[in-house]
Image: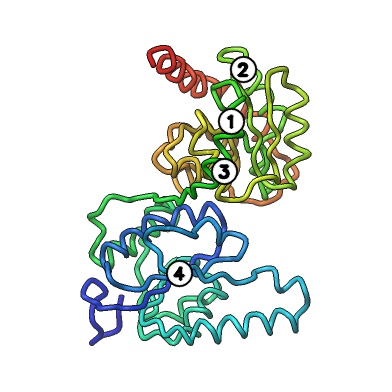
């Protein structure tokens, strides 16, 4: 809510707007509808997005953006003095842009500090913000129950506050022509269906065993043939190799070998995406692709593949949805078997086969 005497957000006039959502990939994807809603609300405004440099290329060319403001989140790894200098230069440059409205969707101390350093007259954040970030806002948008609302719908409260919550949620993902040509050339000699697999995850507790992915993919290839396309970061290559060694059908290992635009172009062409609760899964869902996903320590209600939640299968163990990043038991990995995901994948492949035969 705004302080007494302030213009309500739904009536606020703004000419220069900054949206702060630095990371991670899935969270950025979940925030895309807010950007498009803000563009509808402010068709002539200058709108910029503050993002970690490693994700900036995903936003370049977005039709609703005028600028992408990238900063180096990894500067802190180079030492305290380097980090202070880099952040100081970014904050100074950010302030010089003279934004009159800044919206913080990250909701952590660092993003809250960015909001304050902007010098903007209106600084907006969600009441679910942590690490003291709320102290930096002039306007706080209430989140009634953080534990009962999907991330996309939580961010969408911003659109509602600005009077455009009635609009459809639009996930607009830039697909540069060069990336599209790269994907088309790569897939030209790959038998369909094209099945993208992302077997890794940053959290240990999200990482469904590569052997499970292999069992599911092997069954899919026995049923429909096709090519398994391993995607993800370079750190996921060892997991992809474990899975690939257990397959007899065609595979392509693209882990660590794609840019974000190339990954988006590849997923846009995929016939199905099979992945843990990670950025590539949410990117595929935003692109409208069918997905199959094991959910172990996170909840579909809060972080499922938006719009395609039916493709996500949760573990049934006692601690499901604990959001622990590490665990010494990992009972969920044994309980959530490939057999539980197969009916969903089989239906997707059956639909694909039916469409390919009638084409």
CB atoms of marks 4 and 3 within 8 Å? no
SS for callout 2: helix
Examine the image and state in which quarter residue 301 appears. top left
Q: Which residue is mark 3?
A: 277
Looking at the rendered image, the quarter that the N terminus falls into is: bottom left
Q: CA distance from mark 1 to mark 3?
A: 25 Å
Q: Where residue 266 sits in the image (x, y, percent)?
A: 55, 39
Q: Which residue is mark 2?
A: 221
SS for callout 1: helix
In this rendering, would 196 be left or right of 244? left
- Of badges 4 and 3, nearer the viewer stands 4
Label for residue 67? 4
Q: CA distance from mark 3 to mark 2?
A: 23 Å
**Mark positioned earlier in the residue sequence (1 or 4):** 4
CB atoms of marks 1 and 4 within 8 Å? no
**Mark positioned earlier in the residue sequence (2 or 1):** 1
Above or below for 171 versus 355: below
Looking at the rendered image, the quarter that the C terminus falls into is: top left
Q: Which residue is mark 1?
A: 187
Q: CA distance from mark 4 to mark 3?
A: 29 Å
Q: CA distance from mark 4 to mark 2?
A: 43 Å
Q: Residues within 10 Å of mark 3 (few under 14, many from 20)?
A: many
Q: Where residue 187 sits in the image (x, y, percent)?
A: 58, 30
Label for residue 300? none
């Amino acid at each position: 809510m705004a302080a007494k005497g302030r213009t309500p957000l739904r009536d606020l006039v703004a000419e220069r707007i900054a949206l702060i959502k630095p990371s991670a990939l899935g969270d950025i994807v979940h925030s895309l509808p807010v950007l498009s809603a803000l563009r509808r609300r402010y068709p002539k405004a200058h709108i910029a997005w503050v993002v970690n440099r490693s994700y900036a290329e995903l936003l370049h060319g977005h039709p609703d953006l005028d600028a992408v403001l990238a900063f180096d989140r990894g500067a802190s790894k180079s030492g305290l003095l380097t980090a202070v200098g880099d952040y100081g230069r970014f904050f100074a440059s950010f302030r010089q842009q003279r934004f009159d409205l800044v919206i913080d969707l990250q909701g952590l101390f660092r993003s809250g500090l960015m909001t304050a350093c902007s010098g903007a007259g209106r600084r907006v954040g969600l009441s679910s913000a942590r690490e003291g970030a709320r102290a930096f806002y002039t306007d706080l948008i209430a989140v009634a129950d953080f534990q009962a609302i999907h991330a996309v719908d939580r961010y969408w409260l911003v659109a509602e506050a600005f009077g455009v919550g009635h609009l459809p949620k639009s996930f607009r993902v830039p697909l540069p022509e060069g990336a599209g040509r790269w994907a088309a050339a790569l897939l030209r000699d790959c038998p369909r269906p094209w099945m993208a697999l992302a077997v890794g995850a940053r959290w240990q507790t999200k990482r469904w065993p590569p052997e499970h992915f292999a069992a599911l993919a092997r069954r899919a290839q026995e049923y429909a043939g096709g090519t398994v396309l391993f995607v993800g970061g370079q750190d996921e290559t060892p997991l992809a190799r474990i899975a690939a060694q257990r397959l007899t059908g065609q595979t392509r290992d693209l882990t660590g070998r794609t840019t974000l635009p190339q990954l988006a172009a590849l997923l846009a062409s995929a016939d199905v995406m099979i992945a843990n609760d990670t950025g590539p899964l949410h990117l595929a869902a935003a692109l409208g692709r069918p997905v199959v996903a094991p959910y172990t320590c996170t909840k579909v209600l809060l972080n499922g593949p938006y719009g395609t939640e039916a493709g996500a299968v949760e573990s049934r163990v006692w601690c499901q949805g604990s959001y622990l990043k590490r665990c010494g038991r990992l009972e969920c990995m044994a309980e959530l078997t490939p057999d539980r995901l197969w009916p969903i994948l089989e239906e997707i492949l059956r639909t694909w086969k039916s469409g390919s035969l009638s084409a």
